[in-house]
Amino acid sequence: MLSRNRELALLLAAFVLASCICIAAAGLAAGSQAAICVLACAVVLGVVVGVSTRARYRAIGRLSHELDQCLNGTRRLNLAQAREGELAILSNEIDKVFQRLAITTEQLEAERTLLSDSLADISHQLKTPLTSLSIMTDLVHARIVEDGTHLTEKDVAELAEKLRAIEGLQERVSWLVSALLKLARMDAGTIALAHATVRAGDVVKGAIAPLAIPFDLADVALITRIDDKASFTGDLSWSIEALQNVLKNSLEHTPAGGTVTIDVVEDPLACRLIVTDTGPGIDEEDLPHIFERFYRGSAKHAESAEVNPAGVGIGLALARSLVVAQDGRIRARNVRDADGIVTGAQFEIAFFKATV
């Protein structure tokens, strides 16, 4: 131990030198008996200090060995036996550092896994429309090259239909990329949400404005019943985005001639935006998963969606993320008539007035 600790060796050397000087001085001043007494006291004191110091450095050595094992990942830190005052404080602080490092490591691992999953999801979701775009573009190009000078009106109509389909796929890819980027920003916590008073009526107006033409094309009526005094604390732009995604989902699953209704109400607990459609409703088995990312529900409901039967299951996940980020809540349920028959789906977005 002395060979590895020069500070301790110097301390012991100084103690021995001081004891010798004291013994010599006592012998010269008071005789041999006084010198013997001083020697005995020095030996006892030296033994006590040596034993205490040896125990202390052995404890420090064990702590150092445990730290080396923890750093090498061969064991977990266990400092329960460190009972000495100063060492206990040191051990406690080291334990805090290791706990913080462990939490940080878990967070980094979770973020790495999330990033990997997100990249896989993005690749999977973009592959289908891009493949369709490539095939349809090749077909149109081949048709024009082969029969470019002999196209009939029917041929022109078919090509125009394919070009409209290509345009629709391009819009879908654009929306998908935008939604995925927003979800990625939400996951990374880089979206700065405002915390201001928002009128619910402004949210509804902002959400329905871009959807007026799609509702007309789908022959779906849009009805709004708004309490002009209803308001909440949140972010206007992202609240519009959340409601708009819910409206898109309702539009996609409402057949021609149907209705989508938006009710805005306020009670002492929350401001609520309620979207009700007259579509086929939501399967009971799908309700627990309706807000999960890339969950598309049962096949029969996908086939019944006349506007966009190939939804990718990202709109509601994005809506939920945006609402939850504002300390709100979104939930879905089926609407039933007096006979218990499902008459549509209903989504309720609630922005609470206080956090309980």
Image (cartoon, rainbow, N blue to C red):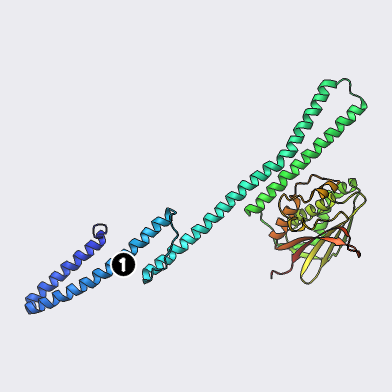
Quarter of the image with the N terminus is bottom left
Between 213 and 2, the residue placed more toward the observer is 2
Q: Is residue 217 left or right of residue 12?
A: right
Residue 226 at x, y percent in the picture: 86, 62
Q: Is residue 24 left or right of residue 230?
A: left
Residue 155 at x, y percent in the picture: 89, 27
Q: Is residue 59 left or right of residue 124?
A: left
Mark 1 neighbour class, 10 Å CA radius: few under 14, some 14 to 19, many 20 or more = some
Which quadrant of the figure has residue 205? bottom right
Between 187 and 304, the residue placed more toward the observer is 304
Which quadrant of the figure has residue 243? bottom right
Q: Is residue 46 visible?
A: yes
Which quadrant of the figure has residue 51? bottom left
Residue 227 at x, y percent in the picture: 85, 65
Q: How many marks?
A: 1
Q: Residue at x 74, y 55 (%)?
A: 291
112, above or below 41, in the image: above
Q: Is residue 190 visible?
A: no
Secondary structure category for the residue under label 1: helix
Residue 208 at x, y percent in the picture: 84, 53
Quarter of the image with the C terminus is bottom right
Residue linked to disc 1:
56
Between 297 and 317, the residue placed more toward the observer is 297
Q: Residue at x 75, y 46 (%)?
A: 312
- What amino acid is at disc 1? Arg
271, above or below 208, in the image: below
Q: Residue at x 61, y 48 (%)?
A: 115
Q: Residue at x 79, y 50 (%)?
A: 298
Between 102 and 14, the residue placed more toward the observer is 102
